[in-house]
Image (spheres, rainbow, N blue to C red):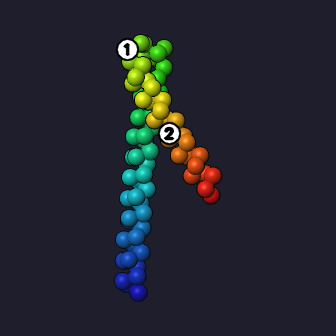
Amino acid sequence: MNDNKSETEVMREHIVWLGSELMKTQAQLIARNNILQDMLNPDVMGWSIPHEVRATIYNLFSQEREEEQNQYNRK
């Protein structure tokens, strides 16, 4: 019984760790998306961002959105 309890505690610690890593990653992605969205908007960053960079960012967002829709449609 003691082994099961320690195994359960270890699993719980892993779950907590994974949850905290997920939250860190989500925060990083939100920060990344906010910066990239600012770069897309000429009113925020001015016209210092070249059109090619804006196009690349737009394509990245479009591709991510398309992948999300495809995953949703598979369910």
Circle 2: element type:
helix
SS for callout 1: loop
Q: Position of residue 69 (x, y in %)?
A: 59, 46
Image quarter where the N terminus lies is bottom left
Question: Picture coordinates of residue 53 (x, y %)?
Answer: 39, 24
Q: Residue furthest bottom?
A: 1
Q: Earlier in the sequence, mark 2 or mark 1?
A: 1
Q: Rate crowding at label 1 as few (under 14), some (14 to 19) or many (20 or more) other CA atoms within 10 Å.
A: few
At 47% from the left and 15% from the top, the residue drawn is: 42
Q: CA distance from mark 2 to mark 1?
A: 24 Å
Residue 63 — which label? 2
Name the amino acid, label 2.
Gln
Front-lying residue, 12 or 35: 35
* Rendered residue at 61%/51% (across/down): 72
Q: Specify whether residue 64 is in view.
A: yes
Q: Give the quadrant of residue 11.
A: bottom left
Label 2 Cα neighbours within 10 Å, binned few <14 / some 14-19 / many ≥20: few
Quadrant for the C terminus, please. Answer: bottom right
Q: How many marks?
A: 2
Give the label, 2 or 1, closer to the camera. 2
Frontmost residue, 8 versus 54: 54
- Residue ID for mark 1: 48
